[in-house]
Amino acid sequence: MDGDDQPTTPKQGLNFARANAKRVATRAARWDLWQSEAEAIWAQRPDLSRAAVATLVKKRLQVSEQADSIARRIRK
């Protein structure tokens, strides 16, 4: 690394940090929604795998993410 990828001013660095924090918060809210939906499904069908539940979460919430992406985020 030659240092060219560093922000030129401290203010730019703060803007990047704020934008990143906003993205993290947005994604965390989405993941929490997936998890709560998965828990509701598992309450009814505890025999289902994470992959099967992820497919149902995708269908119920009508999200564009792939079921395997959802499956990586939910926990039984």
Image (spheres, rainbow, N blue to C red):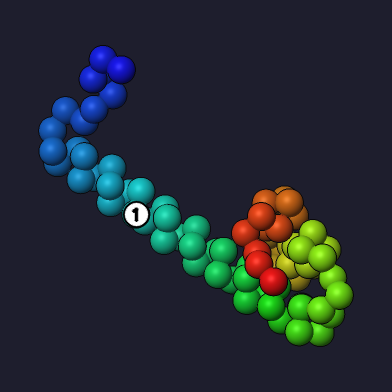
Residue at the image position 84 percent from the left and 80 percent from the top = 45
Q: Secondary structure at mark 1?
A: helix
Q: Is residue 15 above or below residue 71?
A: above
Crowdedness of circle 1 by 10 Å Cα count: few (<14), some, many (20+)? few
| Residue 55 in view | no
Relative placement, left or right, of 26 versus 51 is left
Q: Which quadrant would the N terminus be assigned to in this image?
A: top left
Residue appearing at x 21%, y 39% in the figure: 13
What x and y, as percent, mark residue 5? 28, 24
Give residue 18's position: percent from left, percent from top. 28, 51
Q: Vertically, is 1 above or below 30?
A: above
Farthest top residue in view:
2
Q: Residue at x 42, y 55 (%)?
A: 24
26 sits left or right of 47 in the view: left
Q: Position of residue 4 (x, y in %)?
A: 25, 19
Image point (35%, 48%), residue name: 20
The residue identified by callout 1 is 21
Can residue 15 be seen? Answer: yes
For badge 1, the amino acid type reads: Ala
**Residue with the most extreme bottom position:** 44
